[in-house]
Amino acid sequence: MASHNLAYIKIDDLEIIGYSVAGEETVIAMPQLDVCFDIGKAPDQIIPINHVLLTHGHIDHSAGIAYYLSHRNFCGQSPGTIVAPQNLLEPIKEIIASWGRLDGNKIPANLIGVKAGDEHQIKPNLFARVFPTKHSRGSVGYSVIEKRKKIKPEYAGLTSEQIVELKRQGVQIDNPIEIPIVTYLGDTQYVDFSQLEYIKKSKILITECTFYEDEHTERATAGRHIHINEFAKLIETLENEYIIITHTTQRTAMREIRKMLKAALPAEKYKHVILFMDKRKK
């Protein structure tokens, strides 16, 4: 039996599964991309995924690290990869070592520290690009980008033999292109992310919008989270086909959140928005 009743969304051939409630747990997995954004309490459904992209160290986002790594080892899987802000590597190592002593078995792990501007290769043509967020020290977000090569128009009609010959001569016959598939902001206060083209044009944007009531604006500011008023501003200049809202507060009922979003957003933007926790099986 699965350990969690997770939310589930399918967009084209991509599945998005997870759970995200502010202060309780956040874990968002995309199995076809082999990535899990944050890890929450490590639900069983995400254990087979090889790459965990951790945005920051708050316990509701990171509590399951040791269980994820240990359970993979127990199941005979290769060591899981934890990609995390560089300043978190030492604390993560300490946690894994302590749990290993408690368990009586060493917990194998592949730990990779990153900072804004770095890229982590997931598959031969798939990369996670790291960008800064404003939440806690060193916090980051990730964009998963597919990299391809497109032949230049002047060489499009050539035969395979001619192309091979040009390559042999060292001629650059193609241009690199990037296709931003999904961007995960993690926890963050408002930032104009439209300044980063790969976020602006990412097909899927997964973003927090934690607070909704007018009287909660100070809570949002104090916790470095996004309020609905800032969310409307955030997505105004973005071009994402799908905008998935995570990290919703339990202080406001989901039915009220839906009403507030509909009132706060232009109809053209609202139709692109999906409330993640609305997609749990009843």
Image (spheres, rainbow, N blue to C red):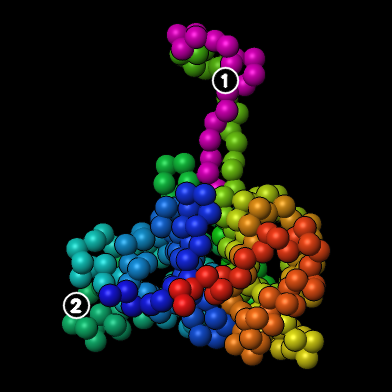
Give the residue at the far front of this rendering: 282
Q: Label 2 is placed on what type of residue?
A: Asn
Q: Is residue 37 left or right of residue 187?
A: left
User: Magenta residues, as a range?
Assistant: 145-162
Q: Label 1 is placed on what type of residue?
A: Ile
Q: Residue at x 75, y 71 (%)?
A: 262
Give coordinates of residue 168: x percent, y percent: 46, 14
Crowdedness near tag 1: few (<14), some (14–19) or many (≥20) residues, C-alpha within 10 Å: some
Q: Residue at x 32, y 74 (%)?
A: 2
Q: Is residue 84 left or right of residue 134?
A: left
N-term mark: 2 or 1: 2
Q: Is residue 41 above or below residue 147?
A: below
Q: Nearer the viewer, residue 282 or 172?
A: 282
Residue 215's disc number: none
Q: Report which residue position mark 1 lands on.
A: 173
Is 148 in the magenta? Answer: yes
Q: Residue at x 59, y 41 (%)?
A: 178
Give coordinates of residue 123: x percent, y percent: 41, 46
Residue 131 seen in this snapshot: no
Give coordinates of residue 255: x percent, y percent: 65, 81
Q: Residue at x 53, y 44 (%)?
A: 146
Q: Is residue 42 left or right of residue 22?
A: left
Q: Report which residue position mark 2 lands on.
A: 105
Q: Secondary structure at mark 1?
A: loop
